[in-house]
Image (tube, helix red, strand yellow):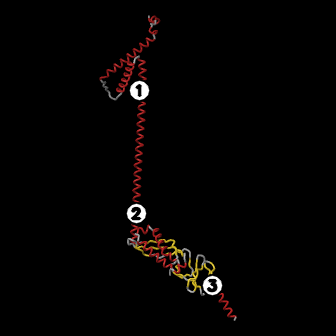
Amino acid sequence: MQVFFIILIALVFIFLWKSIKVVSEQQVILIERLGKYYTTLTSGLNFVLPILDQPRGVPWRDIDGRYRFNYTIDLRETVFDFPSQRVITRDNVVLEINAIIYFQVVDPVKAVYEIANLPEAIEKLTQTSLRNVIGDLDLDSTFTSRDHINSQLRVVLDDASNKWGVKVNRVEIQDIIPPQDIRNAMEKQMRAERDKRAALLDAEAIQRSSVMKAEGMRDSEVARAQGERQSRILEAQGLAEARLTLAKSEADSINLLSSAAGSPEQGLNYLIAVRYIEAFTKLSQGQANTVFLPYESSALLGSLGGIREILKNKVKAVQSSNPEEQKPNNNSKEKWN
């Protein structure tokens, strides 16, 4: 009797232990009663009937790619990194592409009962959709249209997985690996493009340098021409001022001579005679021993005669202006007598 009581207490303890289910946050457990879906256990403390209620196991894919059976379904966003696969572009180039998909289970009942193996189904759907999308693009568009590929894959996978209770949030193309010969050709093309850009930059630099040199020479020539122009203007102004000053001095000298000689004609004759004598003096100061006088040298004598007449007239004018000096000095005569 005592043994039976102990066994009964143990069975009750085991029953209570099996009837309590603690579920973590953002996880659920599907409960089947007698093989039929009964309820979904959410996060927290839950009670079930042992033996009658059993959790439904679901296949799941780990991060390392291995599949296992879980009795809990994670409602958080999950990432699947699929292995590389071969795809063919529109221009018949074979590429190796690796894709990453981010999805989230929004309806765990559909994720379990609408599809037998959800991770494998998503993987195969991603691979087939990726082949279809890449098959519509050529090689160059494949490398430059990653965003287009990602968005198109997300739309296709989201529409197909909607009935499975899954929401595809994002699809990313991780690696695009072309064949070795294509990579060699692309490297040569890239090198040629870089050489072309370098040559263009060198040509532009040379062109700019030539333009700047030409502009510098032009500005230098303009500045030099302006300097010469200003110098010639200043020289001409100085020469004109010198000639005006000389002309004014000559005019003043002519006026003085005219006033001294008594008439303009006599003043001009005196000035011409002086200039003629100065020119003859310079001519006689040459290194030649013999000086040939020109035929017009007789005018020199006329000039000297003119100077003599001017001086004679000047003396008469002075004597006429002082009559007292013309009277004879009687004392002197008596002295001489």
- The x, y position of residue 40, in whole percent, is 58, 80
Q: Which residue is mark 2?
A: 193
What amino acid is labelled 2 in the image?
A: Glu
Left or right of 42 on screen, residue 202: left
For the residues carrying marks 1 and 2, which lies nearer the camera in this image?
A: 2
Q: Is residue 326 above or below residue 138?
A: above
Q: Nearer the viewer, residue 206 or 61?
A: 61
> Extreme right residue here?
2
For numbered disc 3, what is the local secondary structure?
helix
What amino acid is labelled 1 in the image?
A: Ala
Give the Cα separation between the discs numbered 3 and 1.
138 Å
What amino acid is labelled 3 in the image?
A: Ser
Q: Which residue is mark 3?
A: 19
Mark 3 is surrounded, within 10 Å at the Cα level, by few (under 14), some (14 to 19) or many (20 or more) other residues, namely some
For numbered disc 2, what is the local secondary structure?
helix
Mark 2 is surrounded, within 10 Å at the Cα level, by few (under 14), some (14 to 19) or many (20 or more) other residues, namely few
- The x, y position of residue 163, in whole percent, is 50, 76
For numbered disc 1, what is the local secondary structure?
helix
Give the Cα separation between the discs numbered 3 and 2.
72 Å
> Extreme left residue here?
295
Q: Residue at x 40, y 49 (%)?
A: 214
Give the Cα separation between the discs numbered 1 and 2.
79 Å
Residue 186 appears in which quarter of the rendering? bottom left
Specify which label sits upstream in the sequence, 3 or 2: 3
Specify which label sits upstream in the sequence, 3 or 1: 3
Residue 247 numbered mark, or none: 1
- The x, y position of residue 297, in whole percent, is 32, 22
> Extreme bottom residue here?
1
